[in-house]
Each structure stands twice: as C-alpha cells, then as structure tokens.
Image: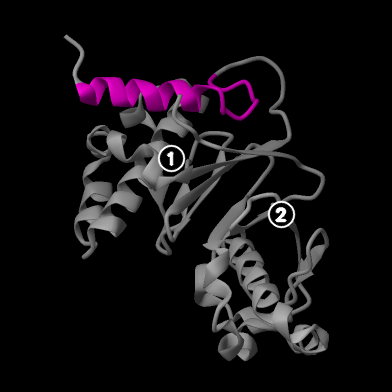
C-alpha cells in the first residue's frame, strides 16, 4: 500500500526528473555540457510534501532545521534541503542518501568528486537552487517587496561608483535598484565561496560583465539577472557564456 509520504516523494521526484542538468553523470560518454540550471520553488505549492521531504534529510540537515525558531523557517529549510538533495540525486543517478553533499566552513554546499557545482538561496516564501557543470555558481533570491527601506544600507552595499549611479536614478526607482545590486553581490560572493566575509562595497557588480575586486583580482565570473520572475529578484554568478535555463518547480 502506497502511503501519502511515498506519493509525495514520488511527486517531487517526477517533477525534478525533467530538470536534471544535461551532462553524462557517473561514467557517461563525452565531456560535460557547459550548462547551468536554476529551480525556483514556492513553499506554499509544496506544503503537502513537507512530511515526505523531512524524511529525506540527513542528521546534520535535520539538526539545522530544528534550530529554526519559527514554523515557516523550518518548512522553508526542510523543503530546500529535500529538493536540493533530490535534484542532485537525479543528476548523479543515485539514491538521495548517497549524494556526497557537504557544506564548507562558511556553509556553502559542495558536491565533491562529481562534475557538479551548486548553490542554494531561500528568502520570503521561495527557494532558488542552482546547479552547474561549467564551474562554480552562486544564486540569490529576494522578494521584490524587500526593497522598501533599503536606502539606509546603500553605503554598505554600493561601491563608490555605484553610489553615484544610484544617486542619479529617479528617487522612486532607487530602492529596487539597490535590492537588485544586493542580490547580484550575494550571488557573486556565494560563487567565490566567501559568503558575506567580504565587504560588498569593495567591488562593483554590473550585470553581464566581469567583476573586479578592489585588489585588482579579476574573477572569471559574470552576473546574470533573471528578470522574468515577477515579484522576485534572482541573480546568478557563473562563468561567462554558460547556457542558463530556469523554471519554477510546479506540482503536477
């Protein structure tokens, strides 16, 4: 007899299966395809799958979830970790428990011994997961509504040159422009693997152009905005000229 938990896992697996990054994993022939993909998940759309999702987490992931004070945060993290693990398992053609998913000292997810690079972001009621077979990748997502009140943070976020650009914008667009800049920089810092350990104001983050840090080190990463996601700011940092696909993960 199929349980609700089994059915929920099957539903997640079925929807995720069509979203695997195009590369020959685990012994397939031919070189990896230079490709990156982003899955976006709305927590409310998958709330029925939460009990099944919780069963997929390892002990460390479950402990992180348990430390969250609020139910909404526990639900968000549970679904994020479960979908992340299921998607990696689909790409690597292994069981979810066998995915070699670890986190470094800064909490950045890694999949050692595989061609995959990955990044995870969650905010508000949405999750963004990025996978790449073309080098490191970073993703960040924020609700567009978070722009309200952002101007107080401008000096912490902006490079001096960006502050000048921001000041020249119409006043009613400055907050949304600043939020977009924040999301770009978060994505880039995740891809570099330093999180918020580096000062955001120390570098400019233009879209579709190389980022140069103040120490004149040029990282071979570019930032791409996914502008078609209504109500959300989503940005990716990855190698230039990588084919990018994205989609919402929707129940059948």
Residue 227, numbered label: 2
244, 147: nearer the viewer = 147
Observer-nearest residue: 82 or 173? 173
Asked which quadrant contains residue 65, the reply is bottom left
Vertical comparison of 120 with 211: above or below: above
Locate residue 189: give its quadrant: bottom right
Q: Is residue 134 left or right of residue 89?
A: right
- Between residue 173 and residue 150, name the one nearer to us: 173
Q: Is residue 6 magenta?
A: yes
Image location (x, y in percent) of residue 69: 21, 65
Where does the magenta region start and end? 4-26
Residue 39 forms part of the magenta stretch: no
Q: Provide residue 234's location: percent of width, then percent of height.
A: 62, 56
Q: Is residue 82 left or right of residue 245?
A: left
Task: Please give left or right for residue 170 compared with residue 66 in the image.
Answer: right
Where's residue 50, x and y in %? 27, 39
Disc 1 target residue = 84
Residue 100 visible to an observer of this rendering: no
Most extreme residue toward the top, as rendered? 1
Q: Secondary structure at mark 2?
A: loop
The dot on residue 113 is none
The residue that appears at 65% across and 26% down in the rendered structure is 22
- Please indicate, yes or no, whether residue 72 appears anywhere in the rendered image: yes
Name the image quarter holding the N terminus.
Answer: top left
Question: Which of these two is toward me, 251 or 172?
Answer: 172
């Amino acid at each position: 007899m199929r349980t609700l938990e089994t059915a929920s896992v099957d539903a997640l697996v079925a929807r995720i299966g069509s979203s695997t990054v195009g590369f020959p994993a685990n012994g397939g022939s031919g070189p990896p395809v230079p490709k990156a993909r982003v899955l976006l998940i709305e927590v409310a759309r998958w709330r029925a799958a939460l009990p099944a999702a919780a069963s997929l987490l390892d002990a460390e992931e479950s402990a992180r979830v348990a430390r969250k004070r609020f139910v909404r945060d526990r639900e968000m993290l549970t679904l994020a970790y479960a979908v992340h693990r299921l998607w990696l398992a689909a790409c690597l053609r292994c069981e979810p428990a066998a995915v070699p998913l670890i986190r470094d000292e800064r909490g950045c997810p890694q999949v050692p011994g595989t061609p995959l690079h990955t990044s995870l972001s969650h905010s508000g009621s949405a999750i963004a997961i990025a996978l790449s077979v073309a080098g490191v990748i970073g993703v960040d997502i924020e609700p567009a509504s978070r722009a309200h009140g952002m101007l107080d943070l401008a000096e912490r976020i902006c490079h001096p040159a960006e502050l000048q650009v921001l000041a020249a914008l119409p006043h009613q667009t400055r907050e949304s422009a600043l939020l977009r800049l924040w999301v770009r920089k978060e994505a880039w810092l995740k891809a570099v693997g330093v999180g918020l350990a580096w000062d955001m104001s120390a570098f400019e983050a233009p879209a579709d152009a190389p980022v140069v840090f103040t120490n004149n080190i040029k990282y071979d990463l570019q930032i791409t905005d996914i502008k078609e996601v209504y109500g959300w700011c989503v940005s990716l940092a990855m190698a230039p000229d990588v084919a990018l696909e994205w989609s919402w993960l929707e129940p059948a």
